[in-house]
Image: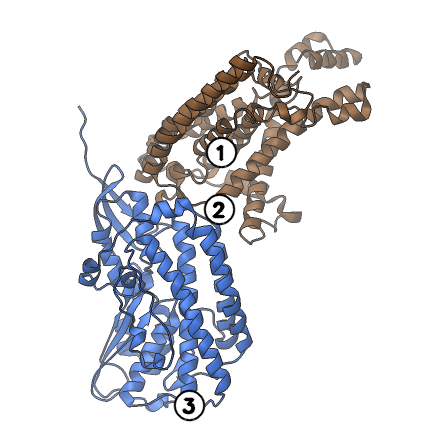
Chain colours: A brown, B blue
Amino acid sequence: MNYLYHLYIEFLTKYGIPKLFGDITFYVLPFCLSAAVLMLVVLFLVLFERKLLGWLTQRKGPNRVGIWGVLQTLADALKLLLKENVTPDKVDKFLFNLAPILVFIPAMTVFCIIPFSAEYTFVNTSTNVILYLVLVAFPMLSLFLGGWASNNKYALMGAARGIAQILSYEIPMTFVVLSVVTLAASMNMTGITLAQYSRNGLLGWFFIPCIIGFLIMFICVLAELNRCPFDLPEAESELICGYNTEYSGMRFALFYLSEYTLLFVNSLFMSIMFFGGYLSPFGVYLSQLLFGDTHLGTVLVYFEQAFWLCLKAFMIIFVIIWIRATLPRLASFDLLKFSWTILIPLAIFNLFIAVFIKYTMGGALCGLS
Amino acid sequence: MTTTTKLKLNLGPQHPSTHGVLRLILELDGEKILSCEPDIGYLHRGMERMAEGLTYVQYLPTVDRIDYLAGFFYSELLCRTVEQALGVSLSERVKTIRVTMLELCRIASHLLWIGAFLMDLGAVSPFFYAMREREMILRYFEKLTGQRMMYNYFVFGGVRKDIDYLYDIEDIINIIPAKLNDYEKIISENPIFIQRTKNKGILEPELAINNSITGVNLRASGINYDLRNSDYLYTDIDFKPIVMSGKDSFTRYKARLEEIRESIKIVKTCITKLKKNSNFEQKLINPLTLKLPDGEFYSEIEAPRGLASVYIKSQEQDKPYRLKWRTGSYYSVNLLRKLLVGEYLNDAIAISGSLDFILPEVDK
């Protein structure tokens, strides 16, 4: 962030604003930016999913509010905001109100540790992969809190299913992350991204040595996000809506928002782990090709990096939605059996492959020079 | 110290997968079902009591509502009972028209079931695909009868008007088989679908017979019992009943798919017959003077959800003294009591979905 920091201070001093102001605001700005961008992304994602599902199921999707239904999500959000906050009679009021907040905060926070470009990582710790794993697993616990506090049998069952699911799918996911960490020799997402750099573009990305790992991770992410075919905790046709049966209005909106935030963040994380994060698939940035080493070129590179990362993430999201339109739901016991008997052994095998590759080839992976 | 208690769960009446307003009182141990008690009557409209206060012709439009997905079958039943009581016989063309309508209706009903069943299993798209195909049939019904669901097309002694727009039916029977092949690809070959339905909800033939199960559910348990074999409408129509021996949910799904194919064949023969014989003649019974003779009358038909029958006790009045409906769904719902015990909750939804009951037919 140093480069951005100096740019910012330089910009302020040009207009005679003291450096102290810059020092304070510089750490607030990225957060505001993250929050604003995240909201926009989520609003877009909801529309994207509905349009895509509509397209896949021979419908039109939202098309009444705004041109091409663009404002539909906004209208929905407004409706949820204006709705009465119903708190059922016999719920644990404190926990009931706490749960949506505890779902939302980790989901927002995790957005801040993603390296969007070489210069833009709001919180950059040396082991932020672990931080990520913790933060992403956290909302599920909050969901359990909500399901428990709702004093509703369907909600409780959904929450219990959610816990069982996350317990069995967190383990293979951690193994896969471990194998990527081994290959990259770094626990930092920027480090992992840079380890995948090669002049041959996408040949250096980790999905080539770790293809099993990627598939496992993809399945685990589906399970963690409660997406189809692993949407047991909120199985609509069985548990009505699972843990959020009793939630309405803004509190439901918070669940909804964090669900899509996590979808986006998980896809970002997968792109970083296996698809070279913000690296260009051609090995060289287009803006560098076009503008060379000019001032404009160096600034545009950062935007291009963010673009590549988001593009990769959206491709993954597309597949996730596609799966939702295609597959029925798994049965709950098959789900747990699948994880313990197939995914975990495979994940450990994948770790062995990663260690073997690392041991024999050292840093010289695929196209890495 | 831990104590375990049974969890009593009210599944319904406003539950998304009970297909109406069925209430199941489940006793659960974790997610395992210990006992199941269906509670019906939330959609009771007094169809039988109503008949005692209405003349036959006043009652005729309401019987479509007994099963809103297959209304033709019930108006056919009432018409048939009255016709047989009065000794009226139908002309060849009218019979063929009725068979065409009934079979199209059966296709529509089975299509909707496929969609709803997959929805129960958590798959979204097949519902819309099935609806798209069903829409063609409903459009045709609307074109011919003016209604999408409550047709009131069959009248005592014939049909309201001659059949028309045969090219639409030809379109339907040309398009649907191709779409069914698509279903085979997206549904029947889907490993998750197979895992969730194969060997789930085994319905032994003895259990089925003891519970008066009829229709596809019975035939999927390996018993060859199709009322269309002996139905007077189907006498000169060549068809083979679909009998499968899998006994599980998957077989019930397969059987319905095959039955759609069989129905399409029937419709095809009907179309050729209709084209050959365009002599539309019928002798309608005057509804104003319609009175059934003293006695008891009974007739039955193979509806999409099992055997449906009507019993009328008449005392030489323009209204029935007593009228009783028998519907297939009622017995399927009762079967849940035995079929769901020992299953897990999410399998239970799949099993109850596979039996294809709809609640208006149960409550009447």
Same chain for the residues under marks 3 and 1 in the image: no
Q: Position of residue B232 (x, y in %)?
A: 32, 81
Residue type (three-letter) at the residue carrying disc 3 = Gln
Where residue A176 appears, x then y in whole percent? 47, 23
Above or below, B332 against A245 in this view is: below
Q: CA distance from mark 2 to mark 3?
A: 50 Å
Q: Secondary structure at mark 1?
A: helix
Residue B182 location, x and y as percent? Answer: 49, 56
Q: Quadrant of the C terminus of chain B?
A: bottom left
Relative placement, left or right, of B357 versus A70 is left
Residue A174 in view here? no
Residue B100: image location, x then y, percent: 43, 76
The secondary element bearing badge 2 is classed as helix
Q: Which residue is more in the foreground, B109 or B63? A: B109
Mark 3–mark 1 distance (CA, rounded to whole Å): 63 Å
Q: Nearer the viewer, residue B186 or A133?
A: B186
- Label 1 Cα crowd, 10 Å radius (few <14 / some 14-19 / many 20+): many
**In the rendered image, which residue does mark 2 sit on?**
A326
Q: Which residue is mark 3?
A: B282
Q: Are marks 2 and 1 on the same chain?
A: yes
- State the residue position of label 1: A259
- Name the chain under label 3: B
Relative side of A284 to A112, left or right: right
Classify 10 Å Cα crowding around label 2: few (below 14), some (14-19), many (20 and above): many
Q: Is residue A320 left or right of residue A235?
A: right
Chain under callout 1? A
Residue type beneath disc 2 = Thr
